[in-house]
Amino acid sequence: MLRIVRPRSSYRRLLSLRPLLKSRPWPSLPLLSQNSTHNPVAKFRAIHTGPKEIPTKTSNEPKVDLNTFLGPSLPSRVYNLWFQHVPDEQSLTLPTPEVFKPWFTKDATFDLECATQFKPILEAIHQAHPESQTQAQAEAQAEQILDLVKPSSPLDWLGLVILLDQLPRNCYRGEESALVFTFFDPISQAITLRALEQNIPSSPELRYRLALRHWFYLPLMHSEDLRHQDLCLEKYREMDEDVRRLLAEASSAGLSEKQATCREVLAKNREAVNAISAQNLRFQKEHHDIIAQFGRYPYRNKALKRKSTPEEEKFLTEMEISFG
């Protein structure tokens, strides 16, 4: 009797990983409880009496239900993880180099913590719409995420931007980073633009807190669209001007409580304030100039399987940089 050998299904289940570490709770934001989930799959008619196999999903089959993964308490979990190492409120207003370090240096332990807590959520967002997406599709998915998360405070918006712009960079490195550039970046940029429309970064909770406000501008910095680069440079200049105006006040009289508190912290170390502002503007100008020259980030070419031009190859050899 002829035995029929069936191909092994390539269906991949989303991982549901338990956090390895608990982040320090942030009092104004509740932590999100974690729920397990499974993916629905369609059955198919067996052609022999052996065990049935689960086929790969087709585009017409149900995709991941994001309601299981996204909700109003999600941004607080992101916030708790991302700022767990910040020692106090003053360091959110005027961060030290030690505060910046975990965010901008590669650390396997921190990457693992990010992936343990949030890669299942990022995977769910991707699997909900795994096809290559146009800008219109990215904007539609951003709208869906906003509808589910319902950010109701500036810190909610902050957590959501970090989830979609920063955490993918910790969870998908090397060859996997193409997913960051082609899938998550367009979504995070759409949400950032919505936040800017609502003037979220200039809210009292964020306006003068240098460890918080700048995260709204990094999705624009990561864009290969020169218009986004122009806007990012404009926003960093606005941030610098806001801080300078605050410090130019003769006293804290007439300021709100939040403004007065931030002014007191910033005024104690104006040199550090100026250094952070100068670094932000310099860093963004470097990104802007690369996009203005090449129309893209050449150091992404390998991950995106793009062929480098001779000019780009020369740039990569001489500059030896890999941000963006």
Image (cartoon, rainbow, N blue to C red):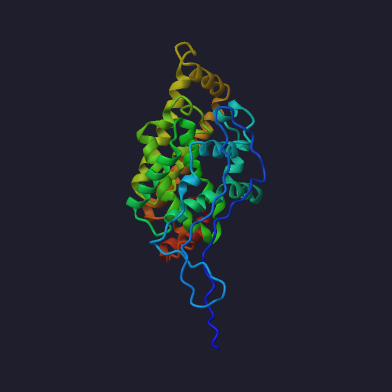
Q: In which quarter of the image is residue 15?
A: bottom right
In front: 97, or 262? 262
Residue 217 x %, y %: 44, 40
The residue lying furthest to the bottom in this view is 1
Extreme residue toward the top, this view = 253
> Residue at 38% of width from left, 61% of height from top?
60
Q: Which of 40 and 255 is in front in this view?
A: 40
Q: In which quarter of the image is residue 193?
A: top left
**Residue 235 placed where, x, y %?**
40, 35
The front one of 11 and 206 is 11
Q: Which residue is drawn at 66% across and 49% down?
A: 109
Q: Quadrant of the N terminus?
A: bottom right
Which residue occupies the foreground of this view, 119 or 128? 128
Q: Is residue 240 left or right of residue 266?
A: left
Is residue 165 shown left or right of residue 272? Answer: left
Number of residue marks:
0
Q: Residue at x 59, y 31 (%)?
A: 26
Residue 131 lies, with reference to residue 282, above or below; the image says below
Relative image position of residue 137 (x, y in whole percent): 35, 52
Percent coordinates x, y for residue 82 in the rendering: 58, 39
